[in-house]
Amino acid sequence: MTKSTLLFVLVLLCLVAYRFGCHRSMQVASGRIKNLHSLPGYYGFFVALWCGVPAVILLLCWLMFEGAVINHLVIASLPDELRNQPPEQLGLIINDVRNVVGGRETSTASPAIQQAATEYLRLRSLSDALLAALALSVAVIGGLIAGWRIQPLLRARNKVEGASMLFLIACSLVAIFTTVGIVFSVLFESIRFFQLVPITEFLFGTEWSPQMAIRADQVGSSGAFGAVPLFTGTLLISAIAMAVAVPIGLLSAIYLAEYATPRVRAIGKPLLEILAGVPTVVYGFFAALTVAPFVRDAAQALGLQASSESALAAGLVMGVMIIPFVSSLSDDFINAVPQSLRDGAYALGATQSETIRNVVIPAALPGIVGGILLAVSRAIGETMIVVMAAGLAANLTVNPLQAVTTVTTQIVTLLVGDQEFDSPKTLAAFALGLVLFLATLALNIIAMHIVRKYREQYE
Amino acid sequence: MNNEATQVLPRRTADVVSASLRRRHAAERRFRLYGLISIGAGILMLIILLVSIFGKGYRAFSQTYVGLDVHFDPAVVDPDGRRSQDALATADYDALLKRSLGELFPEVTERQDKRALHRLVSAGASYTVRDEVLAHPELVGGASRIWVAAGPDVDMLEKGYVDRDAAEAERRMKDRELAWVDKLKAEGRLERRFNVKFFTAGDSRDPEQAGIWGALMGSLYTVLVTLVLSLPIGVAAAIYLEEFAPRNHWVDFIEVNINNLAAVPSIVFGLLGLAVFINFFGVPRSSPLVGGLVLTLMTLPVIIIAARSALKAVPPSIREAAMGVGASPMQTVFHHVVPLAMPGMLTGAIIGMSRALGESAPLLMIGMVAFIVDIPHSVFDPATVLPVQIYLWADSPERGFVERTSAAILVLLAFLILMNGTAVYLRRRFERRW
C-alpha cells in the first residue's frame, strides 16, 4: 500500500470512527441525548481523534526516518569494495541507485548498482507494508479503546475542545518556528563561511569575485569575498528608488486624502494600488527591456557614458513599485489626524496647503517616517528587479549610470544551479542572507518603534 | 527716508494679508498641482508598463504556419509496409519535409542554402507531420497539404519585427530568404493562426515550440499546496490569537514574530527552504511541494493578519449572545464568530494566494528554475511556475522569446486580476455593517 493510499484509508477510518462514536454514545445513553454529558457528535469526534491522531503521528515519524534507514540497509547490502568508501562516494552511489529505481538511467548502471536498486525497491515495499500494518492497527486499536471508554458521563466535549485548543496553539507557534528556522538556517551556514573567510574581510573588503577555481593552480582560485561593493550597490539602488517613491507617494497620498473628491479617490487609490499587485518579475522584465535601453539612449544623447544595465534603470522601476506602499501607509496616517486640528488652522486663516504643510504633515510625521523605513527595507530586500536589470558586475561606484550588483542579486547567482554544499561560494550566499535579514529586521524594529513611541494619540 | 518709513508703518493687517494673498493662493494652486501630477505620474507609469508589455506580447498569441505539399512516400514512412504504429512513429519525417521544400524551390542546390531553406519551418515541424500520419494512416502513399509551424525567423518577419529596408548584412534574414518567404506568401502558403501550442505545450528551447502549460500546471500545484496548508494554519492561528490567547509575554512574542515575518524579504524564505526543507528534510528539489511549503510560510503572516481583522470586526454582542444561551467558548467561536468572519478571511486568503502566485525570488533558491519540458502530474514532479518561466524566458536571447515572455506576463496578470476581482467581489457581496 503506498503512502497516499494509506492516508486515504486513514481518512476513511476516521469517518467510520466518527459514525461509530455517535452510534455508541446513543447506545450507552439508551437512545436519549439528555442522558449524555455532551452531544453525540462530540463522542464521534472523540473516537475519530483517537483513531486518526496517533496513526498520523506514526506516519510522520516514519517518513522522517525511513529514508535514512533504507539508505543504511542498502549500503550494508553492497559488495565490500563499494561499501568501504568515503561518505561522499557512498552518497553518489545512493544517488545512482535512486536514479535506477526512478528509471532514469537503467542502461549505464553496473550490475552491483542494479542489484542494490532491486534491494532498495524490496526494502521500500517492505517499509510501506510495515507502515501500513502498523498505522492501521494503531488507528483501529485507538478507535476501539476510545469507543470502549464512551460512557454517559464521559466529558467528550471538553476533551475534543482541549484537542482543538492544542491545534490552535500549535498553528500560532508556526510563526515562531519559521523565525527560528530562518535564523538557524542562515546562521549555521554563515558560521561555516566565516570559518573559511574572516568576517572582517567580508564586512570591509572592497573586492567581490566569488568564483572558485576547479584546479588549484588556476588564476583567481582563492576568490574574494569583500561585500562592500554589494552594500553600496544595494544602497545606491534603494536610494534611487526612494527618491522616486517618496515624493510621488507622499504627494499622491496628500492629494487623495485632503483634496480629492470621493469619486477621484475611489478611482485613483485602487489604480495606484494595482502597482503593488504587479509581480516583481514583471517589473524586472519591464526594467530590463524597456527602461534600461531608454536610460542608456537618453544618457548617450546627453553625451554620458552608460552601461546597458544600470543602477538607475533598476532604481527607477523599483521606485515605481514602492509608490503604492508609501502612499497607502501615508494615507492611513494622514486620515488619522483629527479634523479639529485642521479646523483650528483654518480658523487662524491658513489656506488648505498651509494647513497640510504646517499642521497635518507634522502631526502624521512619525507614521510617515515609519512607513518610509518599511519601504526602504522592502527596497533592500527586492530581488527580481535587480537580478534582471542591475547587472552582475561588482563595481564600487556611486555613478547611477553604471552597472552595480546587490546583495539579493548575488544570493541568487550564487545559489542558482548545482553547487557542492561546503564551498565558500555557496556559503557566502547564506552570509549575505544573514546580513540582509539583520538589516531589514533592524529597519523594521526601528520603524515599529518610531510609530509606537512618537505617534500622537488624539482623543 | 524717515518720512517714507513713518508713512508705511500704519498699514492695516488686512492690507498685509491681501498683499500676500495672491502669493499664498498661487502656492495653494501649485501644491494642489504637485499632488495631481504625482498621482498622474503613478498612473502613467502603470499605463506605460501595461501598454509596453501588451504591445510586446499580443503577437505571441498567433503563430505563422507554412503549408507544404508533403508526399507521404511509403519508402520513407513505412519501409516494411506493415503500417505498424511503431514504424509510423519513428519514421524520418524530416526527410519528407526537406523533400517538399526542395520541390518548392528546385533552384536551391548549395548545401548552405539548403540548410537556410530548411530553417523556414520549425525544428519541431516533423512532429506535426508525424501526428498527422498517426491520426490518418490512410495518408501514406498519397500527398496532402500539411500546415506546419514556421521557423522563428519567418515568424518574426511575418509579425513585422524584421526591417526589410536595413542593409543585408545587418539583418538576420538575407535577401534570398526574403525572396523565398515572399514566394510562399504569393502562393498562399503562409498563414497566421491562433497559437494553440502556446497554451498546451511545456517549455522548449525553440520559441515556436515553447508553451506555458507546464508552468501553469506547476503554478496550480504550488498554489494548491500553499492554500491547503496556509489557510487552515493561518485561520487557526488567528482564532487563537484573537479569541483565546491570554495577554502575556509569550503571546506578545508570537505577535511580534508574525509582524516581523510579514516584512522579511522573500528571498530569505528561499534560503530557509533550501537549508531546512531540501537539505535537512530531503523534500524533492524543484517540486511544487517544496515551493508550496516555502510560499506557505511566506503567505501565513498575510493570512493571519487579514483573518484577525476579520474576527475583530465581529461585534462582541454576537459572542455574548452565544455565551448567554450556554455555548462554550469554543462553540461560540466556531459556530457563530468564524462563520460571520469567513468572507473577510477568504478575501485575505485570496490576496495571499495572488501574492504567492506572482512570487518568484524564493522559488529560484529551491531549484524551480530548472529547464523542465514535461508537464508535472503531481506535487512531487519537478516543475516550474509561471513567474519563474517568465524569468527564464526573459533571459533567452532569441527575439521570439521576448513576445512569449510578454504573453506569459499577460496570462499571469489575467490570473491576478481574476483573483483580486474575486476578492473585491466577495468583500462587496458579504460586507456587513453592524
Image (cartoon, rainbow, N blue to C red):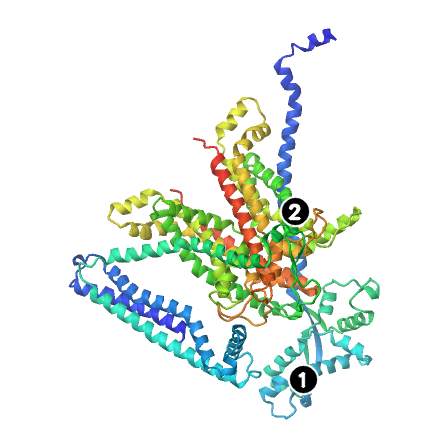
In the rendered image, residues at marks 1 and 2 fall on the same chain: no
Q: For the view shown, which residue lies furthest in the top direction?
A: B3
Q: Which mark is residue A453?
A: none
- Chain of residue at mark 1: B
**Where residue A261 appears, x then y in whole percent?**
55, 36
Name the image quarter holding the N terminus of chain A.
bottom left
Horizontal relation, residue A20 to residue B127: left or right:
left
> Of A454 and B332, which appears nearest the observer?
A454
Camera-side residue: A51 or A77?
A77
In the rendering, at what x and y percent does residue B417 appear?
A: 54, 54
Q: CA distance from mark 1 to mark 2?
A: 57 Å
Could you tell me the amino acid type at mark 1? Asp
Q: Nearer the viewer, residue A71 or B277?
A: A71
Q: Hey, what amino acid is under mark 2?
A: Leu
Residue A439 seen anywhere in this rendered image of the structure: yes
Helix or strand or loop: what does disc 1 sit on?
loop
> Which residue is disc 1 drawn over?
B92
**Label disc, if present, on residue A236 of the rendered structure:** 2
In the displayed structure, B143 sits above or below A224; it is below
Q: Which quadrant holds residue B373? A: bottom right
